[in-house]
Amino acid sequence: MSQLEWYRNFIAVYRASSVSGAAKLRHLSQPAVSQQLAALEAMVGVPLFLRTAKGMQPTARGQALYQQVFDSLDRLERVSRSLRGRDAPGATPLVRLGVPPDYFHAFALERLGNAGFELVVRFGEDRDLLSMLEVGALDAAVTTLKPTAKTLQHRLLAHKHFALIGPPTLELPPANLTPVELGAWLNARPWVSYSQELPNTRRFWQQHLRVRFEAKLSVVVPDLRSVLRAVELGYGLSILPEFLCRESLTAGRVQQVWPVRDLIQGEQWVLAFREVDSDRAEVIEVGDALTVWDDPAP
């Protein structure tokens, strides 16, 4: 076994924080990865990881070694990938994309239909997707969190705005209500939410209405598409991303209760990817397809 493979497995363990995770990334058995890591540690002369309940934690020497070798090996992987591509010009590229399920369903799916590559999608929360990306389990991830890992880069895709919506049969509040009066009006109606914490809703109440959120939650369901459907069926009001409810607003299945686009601080969608994949044509194509900066209000 070459020392180059020792370093590759060392990097995999470092990024996965576990031997089992590294074995999956490297398509090897756990004993094989463990043996190669032990051989590298024997050559270095000191432990590179501490075995803890939270996984493999790099020692100071392990951190230093990672900084010494990761960039060179990532660049070597890029060269190897380009050579494999030239050897098999007819092969269909594969992109493993991590996305939130609501974003993929309502926004990304229609924009990636003509992609010239095979697409394998994983759903998850922002931090989980970035973790999978960092260890090589994904090729790219769409999140509202910018990656902080040194091995990851990102590009901006679009703004994420919000809308306050209600069922089509709802009698809308008078347009001349003060913030406090609007808060009282909204508190008197039932609400539908993704979680009981309601971070965006409570932030809107605190910053703009200056009253406490005291409305009754009629439905709490951890799926934004189900929240939208519940609003359509008359369960209550909700604050949802514009991209998710745009079609329902246009079709009249829901209506905008109050304009909040400029009142609730928006977020930014970013496409995160490994530095070694920054020149991959498929990753660039995903970013181009999902970039929409002139997104109008619904």
Image (tube, rainbow, N blue to C red):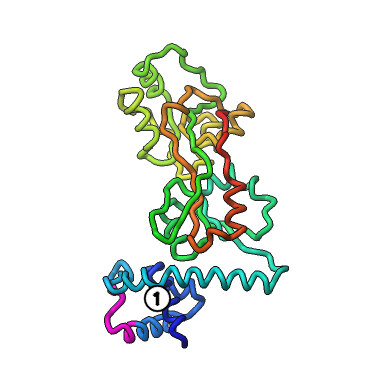
Identify whether 276 is placed above or below 241: below
Magenta span contains residue 43: yes
The front one of 107 and 255 is 107
Asked if one can make out residue 229 in the rendered structure from this viewpoint, the answer is no
Q: Picture quarter containing residue 204?
A: top left
* Residue at far right of view: 90
Q: Picture quarter containing residue 280?
A: bottom right
What residue does disc 1 label?
A: 10
Magenta span contains residue 28: no
Q: Residue at x 37, y 24 (%)?
A: 187
Q: Picture quarter containing residue 8?
A: bottom left
Identify whether 18 is placed above or below 284: below
Asked if one can make out residue 40 in the rendered structure from this viewpoint, the answer is yes
Q: Residue at x 56, y 71 (%)?
A: 79
Identify whether 145 is placed above or below 134: above
The front one of 71 and 26 is 71
Q: Is residue 129 left or right of residue 46?
A: right
First to last magenta residue range: 41-51
Three-letter residue code for mark 1: Phe
Q: Residue at x 55, y 28 (%)?
A: 297
Identify whether 285 is placed above or below 168: below
Quick one: label 1, few (<14), some, or many (20+) residues within 10 Å? many
